[in-house]
């Protein structure tokens, strides 16, 4: 019986696999799975990075201030660097005037003379034209930054793309404003009333390209502000102001003889392209995005990587 007992123990010990072999096998499998997972992550990294770039993020104050300041500086630099093609600009102005006359909307001269007869009104419009297009746009950007951070980046992209299209228009189609037309009998209201107005008039005429009237960036920016307020503001008075602002701007640019009606149409087309660019990048219009961006959560590590780490510790 003792021999039988010894034999059975030896058989059991021979049948039992070595503990070293048992631990080595899963470790090797885990390392293999980890390598596969790592390679899979590398392959997916590029699309994920692209998706993250196209997802709204929380805006940062310093970055946005620097970006807006640099963008406006580049805009001014490029706009003023466009060659002042005086002959082409005046010829294009005559063509625009003839088209508007044919369409029966060439009333800019009548509006210009009528408003100029009311001194306080035209002086107010001169200052309006010189300042509000920048001040109001910055204020709407700040409001979006604080109240609608999830929609801020998409709205900002639409604004920037609108401005880029305007710069392209200045380069491809030089156009003299009505006040510079030869024989147009328009009144340059800034010179007539000695007010600080358009950068293309008075003491500033040598600092800015005077033949960049098409499209009207005043209309592009004011309409961007107005539509943004109308779509996102909760107060009725703010939504009404959003609709009034581009309407008043249109009256101002015509009354001061800085633009034709068709220049305003060009600004609207630029804004349409700007929103199209924003939609193509973010997959939605700004007001359809979430109001706020959730805080980023820590992404869970893949299971294969976790098993590989636990096997290594064992």
Image (cartoon, rainbow, N blue to C red):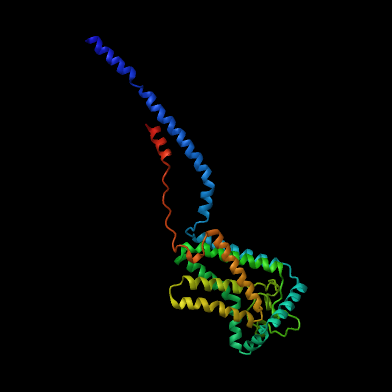
> Picture coordinates of residue 66 (x, y %)?
55, 61
Q: Is residue 98 visible?
A: yes
> Picture coordinates of residue 206 (x, y %)?
71, 73
Count all numbered tags in the image, as a single digit.
0
Q: Is residue 136 above or below residue 13?
A: below
In this rendering, would 10 be left or right of 312? left
Res. 248 image quadrant: bottom right
Which residue is the extreme one toward the right?
A: 87
Please state which of residues 290 and 164 is positioned toward the viewer in this rendering: 290
Residue at 44% x, 30% y is 28
Residue at 52% x, 50% y is 49
Please state which of residues 150 and 203 is positioned toward the viewer in this rendering: 150
Please state which of residues 95 and 65 is positioned toward the viewer in this rendering: 95
> Picture coordinates of residue 20 (x, y %)?
38, 24
For the C terminus, the quadrant is top left
For the N terminus, the quadrant is top left
Please state which of residues 2 and 82 is positioned toward the viewer in this rendering: 2
Which residue is the extreme one toward the left?
A: 1
Residue at 60% x, 84% y is 123
Q: Is residue 303 above or below residue 6?
A: below
Q: Is residue 66 visible?
A: no
């Amino acid at each position: 019986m003792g021999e039988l007992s010894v034999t059975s123990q030896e058989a059991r010990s021979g049948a039992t696999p070595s503990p070293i072999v048992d631990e080595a096998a899963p470790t090797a499998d885990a390392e293999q799975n980890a390598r596969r997972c790592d390679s899979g992550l590398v392959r997916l990294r590029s699309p994920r990075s692209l998706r993250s770039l196209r997802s709204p993020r929380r805006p940062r104050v310093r970055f946005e201030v620097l970006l807006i300041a640099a963008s406006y500086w580049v805009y001014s630099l490029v706009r003023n660097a466009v060659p002042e093609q005086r002959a082409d600009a005046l010829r294009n102005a005559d063509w625009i005037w003839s088209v508007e006359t044919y369409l029966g909307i060439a009333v800019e001269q009548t509006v210009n003379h009528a408003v100029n007869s009311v001194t306080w009104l035209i002086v107010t419009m001169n200052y309006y034209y010189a300042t509000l297009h920048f001040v109001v746009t910055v204020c709407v950007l700040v409001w979006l930054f604080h109240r609608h951070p999830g929609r801020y980046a998409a709205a900002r992209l639409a604004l920037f793309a609108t401005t880029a299209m305007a710069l392209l228009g200045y380069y491809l189609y030089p156009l003299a404003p009505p006040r510079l037309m030869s024989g147009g009998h328009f009144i340059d209201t800034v010179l007539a009333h000695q007010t600080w107005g358009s950068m293309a008039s008075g003491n500033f005429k040598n600092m800015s390209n005077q033949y960049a009237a098409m499209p009207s960036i005043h209309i592009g920016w004011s309409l961007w502000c107005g539509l943004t307020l109308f779509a996102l503001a909760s107060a009725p008075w703010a939504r009404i102001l959003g609709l009034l602002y581009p309407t008043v701007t249109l009256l101002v640019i015509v009354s001061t003889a800085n633009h034709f009606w068709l220049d305003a149409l060009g600004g609207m087309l630029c804004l349409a392209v700007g929103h199209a660019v924003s939609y193509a990048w973010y997959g939605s219009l700004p007001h359809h995005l979430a109001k706020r961006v959730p805080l980023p959560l820590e992404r869970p590590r893949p299971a294969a990587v976790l098993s590989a780490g636990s096997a290594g510790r064992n």
